[in-house]
Amino acid sequence: QLQLQESGPGLVKPSETLSFSCTVSGASISNGTYFWGWIRQPPGKGLEWIGSMFHSGNTYNNPSLKSRVTISIDTSNNQFSLKLNSVTAADTAVYYCARHRRQIVFVTSTDYYYYYYMDVWGRGTTVTVSS
Amino acid sequence: SYDLTQPPSVSVSPGQTASITCSGDELGDTYVSWYQQKPGQSPVLLIFQDTIRPSGIPERFSGSNSGNTATLTVTETQVMDEADYYCQAWDRSTVVFGRGTKLTVL
């Protein structure tokens, strides 16, 4: 059974860099057609997608966070990571890692589009940004 | 950026049918997913590709999508269905979530 487990710092100061890792068990990150990524949820608010990465390096990121985000994959340890730099109090949130599925839909033989969803989530790790 | 609009709250009596809408420009031209999140828990995928339920999701959850509106329908709603529900789509290489709807069963 696939499981994802996040780990994070708990508390960081403004302007520092947040670092998270997500350990995947029950499946190999480097197999299959899955992306691996991150979503966050500020206290009392909704979900905000951060970004995702394929094991070959293909990456998608939320444009609103892109300049501060680095997602990486460590296939040897079956983990993937998130770094978010220059944090402020607005980055206080629960951070979830999740398996992302990208599916292709052919409209014609040459015209297609993707759709994308998250089918397995970790339990989340809470981070507070405060001095 | 692409916006998905959900009502902040929906109320339903136990055993009745609840409908949660998600609106976006030409939303029917793409696929929508739905997630359920109970307090203190991580989200759970309820519906993907507009209408498909993953294994283990009860049949009382169903989805549709046409025009500018996707709808999550919960039939024979149970108290355990009280939760936040989020719609999600993929637009211009970005995952977009709706702001969520709190379903109250009372």
Image: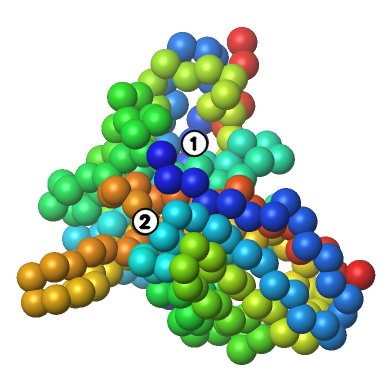
Q: Is residue B52 left or right of residue A126?
A: left
Write the residue at 76% across / 81% down: B17
Badge number at residue B90: 2
Single out the mark in the foreground, 1 or 2. Answer: 2
Q: Is residue B91 left or right of residue B99?
A: left
**In the foreground, A2 or B71:** B71
Counting from the top left corner in percent of width and height, residue B97 is at 50, 51
Tell me the crowding category of disc 1: few under 14, some 14 to 19, or many 20 or more residues within 10 angstroms, Cα based.
Answer: some
Instruction: Name the residue rendered at 62%, 85% in the picture.
Output: B58
Kindly state the secondary structure of the residue where label 1 is placed. loop
Seen at 61% across and 48% down, the residue is B99
How many angstroms separate mark 1 from mark 2 (CA)? Answer: 27 Å
* Quarter that holds the C terminus of chain B: bottom right
Can you see residue A25? Answer: no
Q: Quadrant of residue A67?
A: top left
Q: Which x, y percent locates residue A69?
A: 34, 30
- Neighbor class of circle 2 (other Cα within 10 Å; few <14, some 14-19, many 20+) is many
